[in-house]
Structure formats: structure tokens, C-alpha cells
Amino acid sequence: MINAVDHIGIAVADLEESMGLYKTIFGVTEFHREKVEEQGVDIASFTLNGVRIELTASLNEDSPIASFIAKRGEGIHHIAFRTDTLTDDLQRLASNDIRLINSEPQLGAHDMLISFLHPKSTGGVLMELCSEKQ
Ligand code: ZN
């Protein structure tokens, strides 16, 4: 079941600069830092009352974040929802004509399994489903 907002992914061009901005706005003192090579991203995140804000920069020019920033500039990239039934959700969504970017779960940050849904079939919102590894 999809049961919570897990995090909001924000595409940023310069991670250090963005961390400074979020320090100024929210007084964040500690960020979780992580590179996820599989997704081509460098992440700095912090949590506000259980919802993680994930500042995401690209590690290389071919990453989805790099092409997102090239097309649209920095900003909100995706909303991630937590589920405890990821594989079942993907099957259910696919059978309801929701286009999946990842029909198989991928490894994401925080050692979570993730799959993206295509914004063309979700009203323009890039949605990610994520789940703890079983
Ligand atoms: Zn995410």
C-alpha cells in the first residue's frame, strides 16, 4: 500500500550552493550526503517532520537530473511516496495504463528500492514509489 510522502526531490545545479541556501532558510545544520552511481546523482538531504527534502545534483552530463536542469532549470523534480508493496503496486499501475519509467525497482538513495512513474500518465508530476529493501 502506498501510505506516505517519503521525500521531495529538488534538482539543483550546485549542491554546495544549495546546501548553503537551505541552511539559510531552514537552519539545517546536518545533511545526509550520498552519491548514487546507479542514478547518476549526488544527494544532500535533511528531514522535516518525517518528510525528507532531497537536494539532487547530477554526477554526469547523461543523468536525468542534468537533462532536467538543461530543459527546465532548477526546481522541484519529483515527489516520492513510500509503499510496502512496490512490486504489486507496479503491476497494478501498469495494468491501469500508468506508464512506468522503471518497471523493475532500482536501487536509490538510503538503500531504498525505487521506481519512477512517467509524468505523462500522472498529470505532469514525476512520481517515485520507494520501499525498504525486503
Ligand atoms: Zn527520490
Image: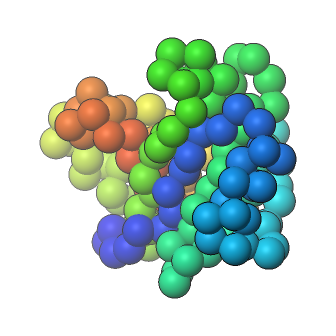
Q: Residue sitting at 49 percent across and 68 percent down?
A: 6
Q: Is residue 68 left or right of residue 110?
A: left
Q: Residue sitting at 41 percent across and 68 percent down?
A: 5
Q: Which quarter shows the C terminus?
A: bottom right
Residue 85: where, in percent of width, then height?
40, 67
Can residue 102 be seen in this snapshot? yes
Depicted 77 relative to depicted 132: above or below: above
Q: Report how many numbered discs are placed on residues in the image.
A: 0
In this view, which residue lies farthest toward the bottom? Answer: 49
Q: Residue sitting at 51 percent across and 16 percent down?
A: 71
**Residue 98 sits in which quadrant?**
top left
Can residue 36 be seen in this snapshot? no
Q: Nearer the viewer, residue 90 or 19?
A: 19
In this view, which residue lies farthest toward the left? Answer: 96
Residue 79: where, in percent of width, then height?
43, 53
Residue 101: where, in percent of width, then height?
44, 32
Q: Is residue 126 left or right of residue 14?
A: left
Q: Residue sitting at 70 percent across and 74 percent down?
A: 27
Q: Is residue 32 left or right of residue 130?
A: right
